[in-house]
Amino acid sequence: MRTRSDRRPNRKNDRKVLVAEESTKSWADTDSDTSSSSSSSSSDSEHEEVHCLMADQTSDDEVFDFSNVEFTREDLVQELNDMVHEYKSLSHSFEEVKAENTSLKNSSIE
């Protein structure tokens, strides 16, 4: 996983792409007319993983294996909270830039 120290200080021209692709070996058939339960459960035969790509014009793949017991629930919750915090920060920055852009457009019209 990338850390903040891996990021370049000048990110003006960087294009970040986040791609998440979920894949499994087998999917629960919820459309079947059988009397089996429609809820899916994780088993050893299923191999579930999410491929995440965060790219600076390169392809650095990061695979998260949900069957790995190395990560605790607390680790996952903390990471999710960090992502939410970063999203809010980026959203706030976006709104500031958007407002500045609108202001500049209005001043150039006048």
Image (tube, helix red, strand yellow):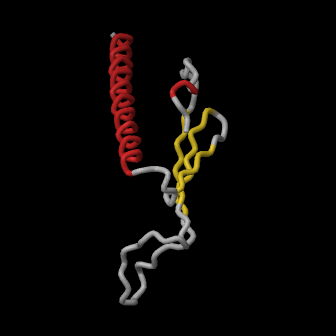
On the image, the x and y values in percent for residue 93 come to: 37, 24
Q: Residue at x 54, y 21 (%)?
A: 12
Q: Residue at x 58, y 50 (%)?
A: 63
Q: Is residue 110 above or below residue 88?
A: above
In the image: residue 91, left or right of residue 69: left
On the image, the x and y values in percent for residue 72 come to: 41, 50
Q: Residue at x 33, y 21 (%)?
A: 99
Q: Is residue 24 above or below residue 106?
A: below
Which residue occupies the extreme right position in the image?
58
Between 62 and 59, the one lying in front of the other is 62
> How many marks overall?
0
* Quadrant assignment for the N terminus: top right
On the image, the x and y values in percent for residue 44 come to: 53, 70
Between 86 and 76, the one lying in front of the other is 76
On the image, the x and y values in percent for residue 7 come to: 56, 25
Q: Residue at x 51, y 27 (%)?
A: 4
In the image: residue 33, left or right of residue 53: left
Q: Is residue 96 above or below residue 76?
A: above
Between 22 and 73, the one lying in front of the other is 73
Q: Is residue 67 above or below residue 6?
A: below
* Quadrant assignment for the C terminus: top left
